[in-house]
């Protein structure tokens, strides 16, 4: 027969075990939330319907010599192609590879085409696009087989993989301001996204070492509220050749990630980036004519 002392020991052992499980579960939840905050990304798909903007994007596909991934009826299997020419209501793409796709395409209801375009971030990331079109007929271009397809009604730009980054307009430069060793410092911004900025500097890695925290940081955006937060250095590279800023050579580009940036301020940067990117698309559209 168990004594009261034995029962008490068993009770406290069970209580200790339960509390230990609760502590472990709470710690795992905390770590998961920390990782989610640390790896936060903007997750939305932008639908581009303006015809001139679509044309500009497609002309960029040709200029960057981007491969198209073509899926018949949106199925998983894909074929490779390239964009050859753009007309008012149709597109001409190269014959599919592997070649059997050129036979299967005749019984296809629609084509789903995916591609990525290079962006101007320091880390050289890419932005994915997709659109649906219909197959029309087979043609030849300079004695090589080609495929005629319809002009897309809209293109989707997927922003889930990374923050979209743009270069500020030359005629409307923006600057980052922060304190460096007790002295207020300003630098011209080379590119900006909702995740961070790259700015020009003549300071070496001995000043902007990786993971150095800059605080406070402020970035006045024309037509938008000033961004105020902290930033952490994540990249530093040499400009080859040097970049001329106000007639003076600048030898380095420093990339920083925003820290402690709240959602309203991040949305302000997103709005600024989209507005400037659309202005650039309209400018390129006028140049391409």
Image (tube, rainbow, N blue to C red):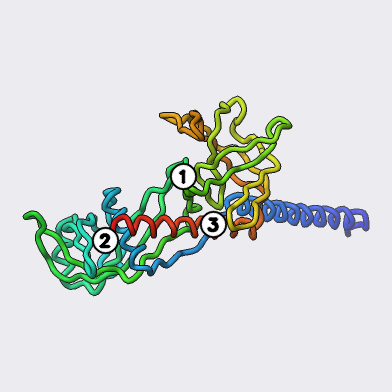
- Earlier residue among tags 3 and 2: 2
Residue 260's spot in the image, x, y percent?
67, 49
Secondary structure beneath disc 1?
Answer: loop
Secondary structure beneath disc 3?
Answer: helix
Residues packed near mark 3 inside 10 Å, few (<14), some (14 to 19) or many (20 plus):
many
Q: From the image, state whether disc 1 or disc 2 is nearer to you.
A: 1
> Residue at 26% across / 68% down in the picture?
151
| Separation of marks 1 and 2 at Cα, in angstroms | 27 Å
Name the residue nearer the viewer: 83 or 19: 83
Residue 278's spot in the image, x, y percent?
44, 59
Say if 119 sits above or below 55 in the image: above
Residue 21's spot in the image, x, y percent?
73, 55
Q: Which residue is mark 1?
A: 121
Tell how many labels.
3
> Residue at 46% across / 44% down in the picture?
121
Name the residue nearer the viewer: 244 or 77: 244
Left or right of 140 on screen, residue 128: right
Residues packed near mark 2 inside 10 Å, few (<14), some (14 to 19) or many (20 plus):
many
Left or right of 188 on screen, residue 81: left
| Separation of marks 3 and 2 at Cα, in angstroms | 33 Å
Q: Which residue is mark 2?
A: 70
- Earlier residue among tags 3 and 1: 1
Q: From the image, state whether disc 3 or disc 2 is nearer to you.
A: 3
Q: Which residue is mark 3?
A: 272
Q: Which numbered tag is attached to residue 33?
A: none
Image quadrant occupied by the C terminus: bottom left
Secondary structure beneath disc 2?
Answer: strand
């Amino acid at each position: 027969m168990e004594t009261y002392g034995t029962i008490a020991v068993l009770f406290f052992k069970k209580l200790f075990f339960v509390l230990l499980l609760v502590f472990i579960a709470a710690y795992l939840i905390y770590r998961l939330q920390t990782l989610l905050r640390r790896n936060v990304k903007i997750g939305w798909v932008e639908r581009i319907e303006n015809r001139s903007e679509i044309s500009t994007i497609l002309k960029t596909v040709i200029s960057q010599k981007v491969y198209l991934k073509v899926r018949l009826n949106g199925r998983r299997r894909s074929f490779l192609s390239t964009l050859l020419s753009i007309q008012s209501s149709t597109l001409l793409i190269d014959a599919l590879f592997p070649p059997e796709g050129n036979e299967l395409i005749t019984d296809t209801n629609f084509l789903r085409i995916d591609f990525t375009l290079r962006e101007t971030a320091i880390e050289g990331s890419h932005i994915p696009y997709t659109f649906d079109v219909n197959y029309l007929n087979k043609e030849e271009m300079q004695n090589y087989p080609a495929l005629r397809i319809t002009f897309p009604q809209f293109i989707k730009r997927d922003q889930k993989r990374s923050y979209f980054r743009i270069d500020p307009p030359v005629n409307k430069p923006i600057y980052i301001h922060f304190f460096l060793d007790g002295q207020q410092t300003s630098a011209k911004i080379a590119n900006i996204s909702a995740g961070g900025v790259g700015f020009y500097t003549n300071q070496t890695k001995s000043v902007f070492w990786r993971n150095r925290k800059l605080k406070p940081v402020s970035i006045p955006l024309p037509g938008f509220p000033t961004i105020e937060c902290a930033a952490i250095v994540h990249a530093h590279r040499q400009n080859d050749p040097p970049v001329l800023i106000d007639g003076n050579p600048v030898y380095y580009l420093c990339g920083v990630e925003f820290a402690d940036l709240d959602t309203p301020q991040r949305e302000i940067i997103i709005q600024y980036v989209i507005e400037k990117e659309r202005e650039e698309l309209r400018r390129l559209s006028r140049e391409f004519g």
